[in-house]
Amino acid sequence: MAVALRCFFPGSAIGRGFVRPFSSRAVAAPSREAEPAASLGHRTRVDFPILHQEIDGAKLVYFDNGATSQKPNSVLKTLDEYYRSYNSNVHRGIHALSAKATDAYEDARRKVANFVNAADSREIVFTRNATEAINLVAYSWGLSNIKQGDEILLTVAEHHSAILPWQFVSQKTGATLKYVGLTKEEVPDIEQLKGLLSNKTKMVVVHHVSNVLGSMLPIEDIVTWSKRVGAKVLVDACQSVPHMPVDVQKLGADFLVASSHKMCGPTGIGFLHGTFEMLSSMEPFLGGGEMIVDVFNDKSTYAEPPSRFEAGTPAIGEAIGLGAAIDYLLCIGMDQIHEYEKELATYLYESLQSVPNVRIYGPAPSQTDHRAPLCSFNVDNIHPRDIAELIDLQHGVAIRPGHHCAQILHRTLGIDASARASLHFYNTKEEVDVFIHALKDTIDFLTCQH
């Protein structure tokens, strides 16, 4: 029987299926010695109703968290409560529903700011997702500050969402894109990155944690080197913010982006962090309601950030749901999540390494200070789509095949696609065992077919 998490949430199962009603605020249980980190997956998964189902008779093993995470009861309840009880537009009305919705929306912004240790909640801009956040920076900052002859520096391991906006900037301005390659350990070559920095470099675009390799970049060092040549730094933190403590002031990057749906929050909402001074220097990305001070026939004046970048009716319920997800993550503790997932990452890597004819991409846990709880891999002479399809149909294990929105990286690795198993804190070592057994069974089946 699973033991419930010490911080309980609405709808959490406590004990033998008993559902105890709680307020929307997380309530700490009576203090007792903390359970070992190894049991975190068992203690939290009771809060995720989607995990308690079967796929064609097999218990669901959800290992596609790199694409999106599942949502705890507290987030689902928060969304339901908003739409049932105080659905209204924000920053517009003076009636009770609008005031409550506005307070909850801005409270969510403060929660995000605190979560990443922003200096001011005005440094958090809500966007549809991390993709839109990067486009915002590319169009509002990039087109105004990058010109012909300038350089934009990226790594070959970036997500398409971090590459395409800067390709657009390059095409419109005549700036040059430069790419950092991989080392023999299959991580971005930091020494090459350092060597490519010059007075021509205006923007450095890097991931914090790779969605394919599972490796982490030394952002503080990259920021230090970049600032010496006057370059700005944008960090794609989609694969780090949900899994470890992230301090934007300590990292020092000019911009950082992340998505709610990977943080156990709703889809349709993400955020951009930028210093208030930097955001204040940028032109709007979109025009519309609530991002203005005055509108005249031939011109307009714009609101201060973040309103300047949030034109029109925002994703109100989704922002409030993100706030609830942050409450949930903080109740567990990001340090505890990070430590548990490090152990889970090593177990996943070593278990997968034991399967014959499997090739894992990226560094081994022993080769790096941090390896995310994900593994991209291939099996000799078997297409990753066949692996993913059969392992789901026959065993209820959800993994992802494809290029994972990282075609340049896959070409650099000499492959077209890979299979990826990506875990979160609600996964367990027992599920890894199920996955490995299912993978071996699937390989045997497909090998026999050939």
Image (cartoon, rainbow, N blue to C red):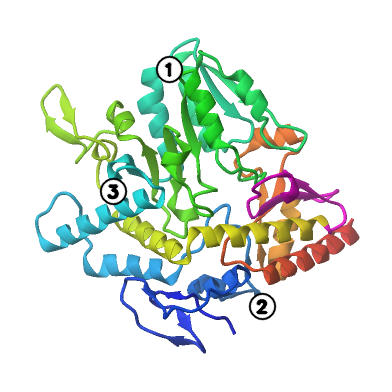
Is residue 245 magenta-colored? no
Distance Cα–Cα, label 2 vs label 3: 41 Å
Q: Position of residue 65 (x, y in %)?
A: 57, 57
Q: Which mark is residue 314?
A: 3
Question: Quarter-wise, where is residue 195 in the image?
Answer: top right
Q: Which residue is mark 1?
A: 146
Residue 69, compared with residue 303, is above or below; it is below
Asked whether residue 202 appears in the rendered view, the answer is no
Residue 303 lies left or right of residue 438; in this view the side is: left
Looking at the rendering, the stretch of residues picked out in magenta corresponds to: 354-382
Q: Quadrant of residue 325?
A: bottom left
Q: CA distance from mark 3 to mark 1?
A: 29 Å
Q: Is residue 231 visible?
A: yes
Image coords of residue 377 (percent x, y): 75, 49
As rendered, which of 176 and 106 lies closer to the eye? 106
Q: Nearer the viewer, mark 3 or mark 1?
A: 1
Q: Nearer the viewer, mark 2 or mark 3?
A: 3
